[in-house]
Amino acid sequence: MSDKVIVESRDHILTVTFNRPEKYNALDPESYHILAKALYRLQTDSQLRVGIIQANGNHFTSGLELDKWAPIFAKGEAPKLPPEHIDPYGIQGDQLNKPLICAVQGLCYTSGLELLLNTDIRIATNDARFAQLEVQRGIYPCGGGTVRLPEEIGWANAQRYLLTGDEFFAEQALKWGMLQEVVERDQLHARARELATKIAQAAPLGVQAALRSSKLARTQDQNIALHSVFDEMPNVMKSEDASEGVRSFLERRKANFNGR
């Protein structure tokens, strides 16, 4: 098993750690497939409730290892994913239906920024630097950045950076709402796990239903999401977790959910 990407699970949390600090955690095709397979594991393992993507070293990622990806992109199509993989960029195949937290430090360039934009909660260090600098390399963003960055930070703000390839910084991203928190470097991974633990301790069926409804509104239409908001309620209300939620309220104690 490659050590380029470390995949670990504990306490209902799947943690994926980029581990090529000497290469600025550049994402090569092998690392992409390891990540995609880890996300499928998160999707299908009933014991897993939330995921974290993070990185060792000074930088989250400098982006794709372009020389290894150029022949793939030259075909004009997304890289093929075999079964039992979930696309980290949400472009092809099934969409992830469990929450994903992204924790970044230092450089978060090109595919790294596009990966972050396809996660649900994002935190960064105060030295984090973001860029879609593809136009400075003779190409353009193809991992969702042209769609999601305008949605996250506003049309003109996004074009300012998509069309120049310039950097922007953590405090700007926090002000725009692209990031939820900015933390010190030595707190980054601990804070990501703290947030993941809070999600893991919540009712999994409720969390997943809330996330699906939110994604439906984001990717399709708000009216569709509003008219569908009660679709899953009967099954959720019949669950053991719903009964436990009521009991814990009446008994004034913390609920212990089992995902059933």
Image (cartoon, rainbow, N blue to C red):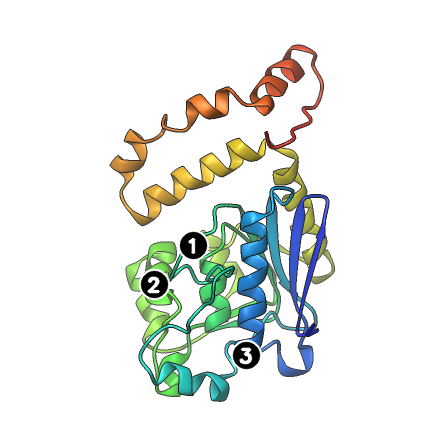
Q: Measuring from the top left, give residue 5's x and y in whole percent.
A: 65, 69
Q: Which mark is residue 224?
A: none
Secondary structure under tag 3 reads: loop
What is the spatial separation of the Cα atoms under label 1 and label 2, in whole angstroms?
A: 9 Å
Q: Measuring from the top left, give residue 91's x and y in whole percent.
A: 37, 62
In percent of the image, x 57 and y 78: which residue is there?
26
Pick whichever, 146 or 35, lies toward us.
35
In percent of the image, x 65 and y 29: which residue is there?
257
Q: Earlier in the sequence, mark 1 or mark 2?
A: 2
User: With respect to residue 175, does 144 lie above or below?
Assistant: below
Which circle, 3 or 1, is nearer the viewer? 3
Q: Measuring from the top left, give residue 207's x and y in whole percent.
A: 52, 36
In percent of the image, x 57 and y 76: which residue is there?
30
Pick whichever, 128 or 234, lies toward us.
234
Residue type at numbered disc 2:
Asn
**Which residue occupies the extreme top position in the image?**
250
Q: Earlier in the sequence, mark 3 or mark 1?
A: 3
Q: Would residue 140 be seen by someone viewing this image from the given angle?
A: yes
How packed mark 1 is, by other alpha carbons closer than 10 Å (few <14, some 14-19, many 20 or more), is some
Return the residue at label 1.
176
What is the spatial separation of the Cα atoms under label 3 and label 1, in whole angstroms?
A: 30 Å
How packed mark 2 is, by other alpha carbons closer than 10 Å (few <14, some 14-19, many 20 or more), is few
What is the spatial separation of the Cα atoms under label 2 and label 3, in whole angstroms?
A: 29 Å
Return the residue at label 2.
157
Return the residue at label 3.
28
**Image quarter of the C terminus:** top right
Residue type at numbered disc 1:
Trp
How packed mark 3 is, by other alpha carbons closer than 10 Å (few <14, some 14-19, many 20 or more), is some
Q: Would residue 123 be seen by someone viewing this image from the given angle?
A: no
